Amino acid sequence: MPRRCMLLVLSCVWMTACTGGEPSSGPTTISVADWSKVGETDIYVYYADRGSIRKADETVTMSDLFDYKTAQTEGDISALSKITVREYDCQNQKSQPVKTTWYADHMGSGAVGRTTGAIGKLTTSISGTSTAVLMKVACGL
């Protein structure tokens, strides 16, 4: 039994040393995210990472992934998916993207084509849109 405890402690120390002991920040990728399909349109399938939900005061943040059925053009790049960290004001039914990263391949994989930051303005979520569905997941509605 003491030997098992020592192995467990050493494993934890080794993992902390390898990761720098710091939590990940920013959007998650498919290798560490737990994507749950929440909807589909003719253009894309969209997913929520329920494990990324963070609550702070009146706002909630959550990562989402849009996986496009055909390549989309964003600026001068072609992308098949994007991961967005989105901020939600659950009480007022508003949201805004905090950080969006476009990927060359499906499910947030491949080369990063472009990353954009927050627009600085919460907008009302329109009923029936993918953002409104994602808000329900993030806010627990």
Image: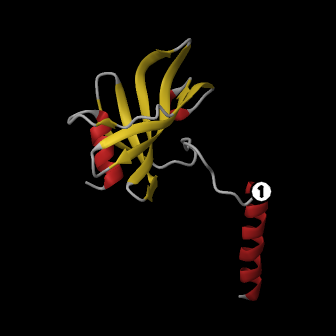
In-image side of 102 versus 89 (left or right) = right
Name the residue furthest bottom.
Answer: 1
Judge by depth and name the residue closer to the eye, 28 or 61: 61
Judge by depth and name the residue closer to the eye, 80 or 97: 97
* Residue 44 picture location, percent across and down: 36, 27
* Residue 50 picture location, percent across and down: 42, 52
Judge whether 70 appears above or below 16 on screen: above
For the point 60% across and 28% down, which residue is it?
110
In-image side of 105 versus 20 (left or right) = left
For the point 34% across and 48% down, which residue is it?
89
- Find disc 1 in the rendering and name its residue: 18
Q: Dot 1: what SS? A: helix
Judge by depth and name the residue closer to the eye, 101 or 93: 93
Judge whether 107 appears above or below 55 on screen: above
For the point 45% across and 58% down, which residue is it?
56
For disc 1, the neighbor class at 10 Å (few under 14, some 14 to 19, many from 20) is: few
